[in-house]
Image (cartoon, rainbow, N blue to C red):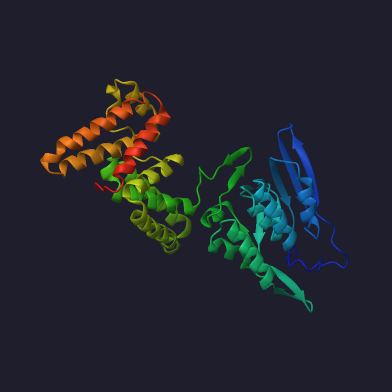
Amino acid sequence: MFGRLLISITLAIFVCRAAASAEIELFNLAGELDIVSIKGEIVDGDGDRFNEVVRDRERVSVVLQSPGGLVRDALQIGAEIRLRNFATMVSSDGECYSACGLIWISGARRYMSAGSKIGFHAAYREENGEYRESGVANAEIGSFLTHLGLRIEAIRYFTIAGPQEFLLLTPEHARALGIDVFEQNGIDVVSPDQLPTVDTYADRFVSYTLLRSRCTGFFQPAESAIDEGIRQAFDEGNRLVGAEQWIKLWTPMLDRVKLEIISKGALLLCLDTQSHLRRQGQPTGINSPSFNCSQASTLTEHAICSDENLWAKDRAVNAIYFWIRSNVESSLRQRILAVQRKWLGERNACGGDFRCLNEVYDARIDDVKLIDVN
């Protein structure tokens, strides 16, 4: 039977002789990329053999074709793969079961196809001719997967099937479990950015919800973009895992955001959130600084308009200034105006120096970070 997940003290139990070690071979493509192929059952010593093969290598993709084998050696190989930032791959017609799946999941970038057969079941041992789950080995697997950053639903998936069963992982199911995959279709590859996991959608849903509820006063964003972000993230997350699991995913994230508002303040959290979304290539509704760039006349104004990293900062500083002016006694407004003019002088002295501009904006934001205009 395929996919034996065995504790380290157990040798080959389906054959009378010790199983041959896996074939671990190194290939080089055009002097740029190293390919390590692992074929066959993973047995005692294969972890050391793998480490020896990749010892002096930096950029490696590990291609897997294996029925499984020893948990201990599989975890040793997996740990080396993750520490070295290697990629893992199961081809479109490849098979990678149980212990092999633990190696595949360790990849910093995981490649699979719709036709890849990647299967999981619980670790087990032989006792008097019967195969029983090994609590020790499953605990080791759970600890390893936790260190990889997988959530409990994925860990359960990998260890829930019995010794004579398999749960086969599809690209769609991987995304529902929060596992980033690069899905191959011939020469085409769909990245996790193009088809995110449900965890990414939950994060986006909470991020957009924060922008909508607590950040509009700072940024005056295009609300249609925020509302569309909320809708799309909600719909995709709900589609992937269903309403009950979807709510369980984003609710704790929202609770953490509420605590961060208390500890960090709304302004800093809003700035971090819009930056986080922008790094993912997501629209934030912040499409310019606080002024009309078509009317920019100074070197500083042109620099601000050309650097989207400054747009939210400029909008926030501007919004806070006008909020303060509207909420203080008239006798203080001249003093507030003087402070603002002094700061504008420091900003304009930066000219087109982006580092200087960011430092000046950050210093001003630090001065006013406790002010909430929402």
| Observer able to see residue 176 | yes
Q: Could you say which quadrant of the image residue 304 lies in?
A: top left
Where's residue 169, x and y in %?
Answer: 61, 57
Q: Which is more toward the observer, 208 or 291?
A: 291
**Residue at 28%, 30% in the rendered image:** 344
Q: Nearer the viewer, residue 207 or 243?
A: 207
Q: Is residue 239 left or right of residue 349?
A: right
151 relative to 294, above or below? below
Circle count: 0
Horizontally, residue 300 falls left or right of residue 150, namely left
Say whether residue 122 is visible: no
Side of 196 relative to 94 (left or right): left
**Residue 318 locus on image (x, y percent):** 26, 36
Residue occupying the point 36% across, 48% down:
269
Q: Quadrant of residue 331?
A: top left
> Which residue, as the protein is rendered here, is positioned at the far left?
330
Q: Who is closer to the viewer here, 281 or 41?
A: 281
Q: Is residue 252 above or below residue 115?
A: below
Q: Quadrant of the N terminus?
A: bottom right
Residue located at (30% from left, 26% from top): 293
Figure quadrant of residue 157: bottom right
Q: Residue 327, image x and y in percent? A: 16, 45
Given the current orientation, which residue lies at the most extreme bottom position?
Answer: 128
Residue 259 position, x and y percent, is 37, 58
Residue under the point 31% across and 35% down:
314
